[in-house]
Image (cartoon, rainbow, N blue to C red):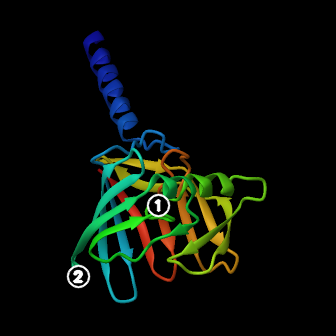
Amino acid sequence: MKNVGLFFMCILAFAKGLSAQTEPTTDGTAAQITVGTQLVYEVTTASAKYQFIVTVKKLDDGITFDWKMTAPINKKGTVVMAEEAVENAAGLFNYFATDTARLNDQTSVWISRTMWREMHNEDEMVLISLDNGEATGFFREDGEAHKISYKGKPLDMKVSNLKSLTDTQTITVWENEKFPIILKMDLGWTIELKEIK
């Protein structure tokens, strides 16, 4: 009888261990962005749905990443963000051509550290220029956890939502001052992070 009881206790401990391994982290702090990390986004426009895959190449003295759009777009290229842009840019770059884009006053996939700090100021507002357009005011509010797959396991990422004054545009940002990556945007078309590899 003791052996049966011990067997069931072992089964319960094993099951509890499995359950703990599949529980998502609630704040996303387990996620790390390093050279070689891949961010897999899903893009939906009026005419197409495809993946936008970012591969981090450099994280010092600015940020460099390669990008690829899957079928039906089938484009690829590189974005090089200068350290000044990573620190202070007030603009976002969202329309990708092929070859290399060098950004000195815009960021892409990330928001700048200055934007991150401004959205956490007392008024929780930041001015953002989208693709060289006129700067628009966005207000910060806490958002629901953003669910992704991180290295094959579920992960809940803590976020802030930035909503435009007209409420027609939303940018969701990871609550991580070191790596304030964009998790989701709705600008009339949508892009959403689905996986980090």
The image shows residue 169 at horizontal and vertical percentages of 58, 76
Which element carries disc 2, helix, strand or loop?
A: loop
Give the residue furthest to the bottom.
47
Label located before the other in sequence (2 or 1): 2
Left or right placement of residue 123 versus residue 106 in this view: right
Mark number displayed over residue 72:
2
Residue 166: quarter of image: bottom right
**Placement of 168 over or under 123, stated as above or below:** below
The image shows residue 40 at horizontal and vertical percentages of 32, 61
Measuring 41% from the left and 46% from the top, which residue is drawn there? 61
Measuring 45% from the left and 81% from the top, which residue is drawn there? 189
* Front one among 150 and 14: 150
- Judge the density around disc 1: few (<14), some (14-19), many (≥20) Cα neighbours within 10 Å: many
Question: What amino acid is found at the position of numbered circle 1 in the picture?
Answer: Leu
* Front one among 81 and 160: 81
Q: CA distance from mark 2 to mark 1?
A: 22 Å
* Front one among 163 and 59: 59
Question: What amino acid is found at the position of numbered circle 2 in the picture?
Answer: Pro
Give the residue furthest to the right.
122
Which element carries disc 1, helix, strand or loop?
A: strand
Measuring 36% from the left and 65% from the top, which residue is drawn there? 41
**Placement of 40 over or under 19, stated as above or below:** below
Mark number displayed over residue 30:
none
Report how many numbered discs are placed on residues in the image: 2
**Placement of 65 over or under 46, stated as above or below:** above
Measuring 54% from the left and 56% from the top, which residue is drawn there? 112
Give the residue furthest to the top.
2
| Label 1 sits on residue | 183
Residue 46 visible (yes or no)? yes
The image shows residue 30 at horizontal and vertical percentages of 43, 39
